[in-house]
Image (spheres, helix red, strand yellow):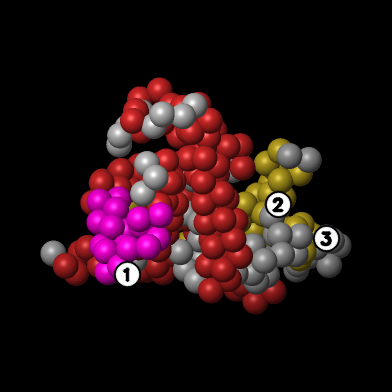
Amino acid sequence: MLQQVNQLLRRKYPFEFVRLNSILIISILVSLIIFIYQPFGFSQYRGNKLLGALPFGIATFGSLFCCNYILKGKILKHRIGRWTIFHEAVYILTVFLVLAFFNTLIFLFFFEDIYAFRNGELLVRLEILFRVLLITVAVGIFPVTAVIAIRYHRAMRHHMDSIIRSDQQLQETNPSQELVFPSTNITEAPLQISLHDFLFLEVVKNHVHVYHYTDGQVTSTVIRNTLTTILETVQAPTLFRCHRSFIVNLTHIKTATGNSNGYKIMLKDYEHYPIPVSRSFVPAFQEIIH
């Protein structure tokens, strides 16, 4: 049981940021909830309740902004090479704790307990904060679990590329990198496309069918060559050989279904047929998506 939980927590998770407009909306909603429903004894506040509710929104905005763009965007992004479910859970709980800390100070200020809190014994102050933070974790762990599960399954079904990109080693470090597909036919010019425009290739006998974007549309170009030669000349971190006849660009994967016997990959903007992952390549593919 513990081993299964450990394996689940070590699975890759999309490394995403909350948009600034979403942070603003959340902050406004927090102020409105405090003003309308007046929870946690806020109804006892004798001042202007609308103005009294604003600091909670401001604290929420500042906390989310710092956690999102500084903690996650500047610090964690460069120190954690493989973002997992465990990292996401700890990060979200940290955001909860930061919000709880500042909101506790605001409540103490409104109820004129901030001075007693400031002048009280250290153990008393720590006990108050510890209780608030403990309650925050106890209450927040359930919505955190739900949010993580929903976002993870949504990414697995529709945006698997976001999970793959959570591993810095598999990010397109240079999407404009030029891929050159040589041809054994001396009268045929090599195919040159950017890494970002390449979707996948399929080898049929001695011909390589390269599927790529051209002016926003998926097209295919056929060149005469073997997969062995292509593997030696065309290399990039996001290119993955999934079958004896297929190479796929991991950053264009929409979803994949299967098990240890094999997978079927669906690519974005190309759903004519799935790309197979043969059994011999399954362990490597599972390592990439999990």
Q: Name the residue at 76% across, 60% down.
A: 176
Give, as a three-letter code, the residue at label 1. Answer: Leu
Can you name the residue that lies furthest to the top here? 36
Q: Is residue 190 left or right of residue 208?
A: right
Residue 122 - label: 1
How much space separates mark 1 and mark 3, taking CA atoms?
79 Å
Q: Is residue 256 left or right of residue 41?
A: right
Residue 254 - label: none
Q: Nearer the viewer, residue 10 or 256?
A: 10
Q: Nearer the viewer, mark 2 or mark 3?
A: 2
- The answer to whether residue 230 of the structure is visible from this angle is no
Tags 2 and 3 touching, CB below 8 Å: no
Q: Nearer the viewer, mark 2 or mark 1?
A: 1
**Quadrant of residue 190 in the image?**
bottom right
Sequence order check, earlier mark of 1 and 3: 1
Total tally of numbered discs in the picture: 3
Q: Name the residue at 62% across, 52% down.
A: 199
- The answer to whether residue 175 of the structure is visible from this angle is yes
Give the residues drawn in magenta, as a range. 115-137
Query: Is residue 162 rendered magenta in the image?
Result: no
Q: Which residue is mark 3?
A: 188
Q: Which residue is mark 2?
A: 197
Q: Is residue 17 left or right of residue 182?
A: left
Residue 1 image offset from top left, x and y in percent? 13, 64
Local crowd size for mark 3, using a 10 Å CA cut-off: few (<14), some (14–19), many (≥20): few
Can you name the residue that lies furthest to the left here? 1
Residue 4 higher or lower than 218, as above or below: below
Give, as a three-letter code, the residue at label 3. Answer: Glu
